Amino acid sequence: MRRQLIERHQLRFDEQLPQASDSDFIARYLLLTRAAYTLVPLAVYEYRRRGDGSSIVDQQQQNVTRYKLVFGRAHRRLLELSAHETGSDDCPQWLANTILYFTFYLFRRNRSADSPVYETDAGVLAEIRGALQKNLRSIGAARIRAFRLHDVPLDMRAAWLAAAQGELRSSPVERLGVVASESTACVSFVSSNLSLPRGLRIEGRHLRSWTLRRAVSSTLGGPGRSSTSCD
């Protein structure tokens, strides 16, 4: 890193961020250099964890409120800086990957029964969801679909796409199993419309007869936006 550039732009660590202030600083620096970057998901480095749980990472595991700053301040600033430096609202993929990387970990925690999300004030969660939705709309559906740093579950990526687009316009279909004796295939898909779909097609083929089993999921304590179908 060049100190001259850091001083010229008065780049400093954001001391209000309780965690990952180094990632925020690096991302702002990279945006100001206006170069092209690639995130390598398989890069390996030595990471030492304290056994007594005293590290900042361990202490912040239960602090969902911090995402008000992460999504509403740090990530929003990165997206606005990107638009300013490039003269375009098109978020570069490396920046989308950086933001979605942190988003993934919050959503992954939300999937566990003891998630701290369930102990967080509803008003705080509403602020976090609002800031996240704004960021996902700036990132765009194409960048969300291209995110591959993690193996993102179908319903999780679908929730991001629904937030970015206002609704889920299409969904991949997962085959869950086949009952040969009944000539029946069980499949799963995700929809932001909780009513019965019309004209359901899978791989271009219209289904002649099918039944629906619906499973509603929530996004960070918000209303359900997905359903599961079995044909």
Image (cartoon, rainbow, N blue to C red):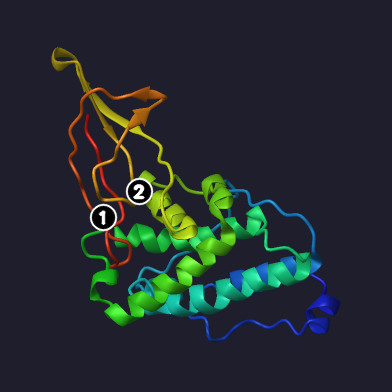
| Drawn side of residue 94 relative to residue 208, left or right | right
Please tell me which residue is depicted at 60% across the width and 83% down the height of the picture. 14
- Neighbor class of circle 2 (other Cα within 10 Å; few <14, some 14-19, many 20+) is many
Mark 1–mark 2 distance (CA, rounded to whole Å): 8 Å
Residues 58 and 192: in front is 192
Q: Position of residue 204 (x, y in %)?
A: 42, 24
Q: Is residue 175 above or below residue 125?
A: above
Q: Which residue is mark 2?
A: 155
Please indicate whether residue 194 sits to the left or right of residue 39 in the image: left
The residue at the point 68 percent across, 83 percent down is 12
Q: Is residue 12 above or below residue 152?
A: below
- The crowding category of the residue bearing disc 1, from other C-alpha atoms within 10 Å (few below 14, some 14 to 19, many at least 20), is some
- Sequence order check, earlier mark of 1 and 2: 2
Q: Amino acid at mark 2?
A: Asp
Marks 1/2 in contact by CB < 8 Å: the verdict is yes
Instruction: Say which element carries label 2.
Output: helix
**Quarter of the image where one finds residue 212:** top left
Percent x, y for residue 149? 53, 49
- Residue appearing at x 41%, y 74% in the figure: 128
Secondary element at tag 1:
loop
Q: Amino acid at mark 1?
A: Ser
Specify the label residue 217 is tagged with.
Answer: 1
Using the image, determine if residue 37 lies above or below residue 213: below
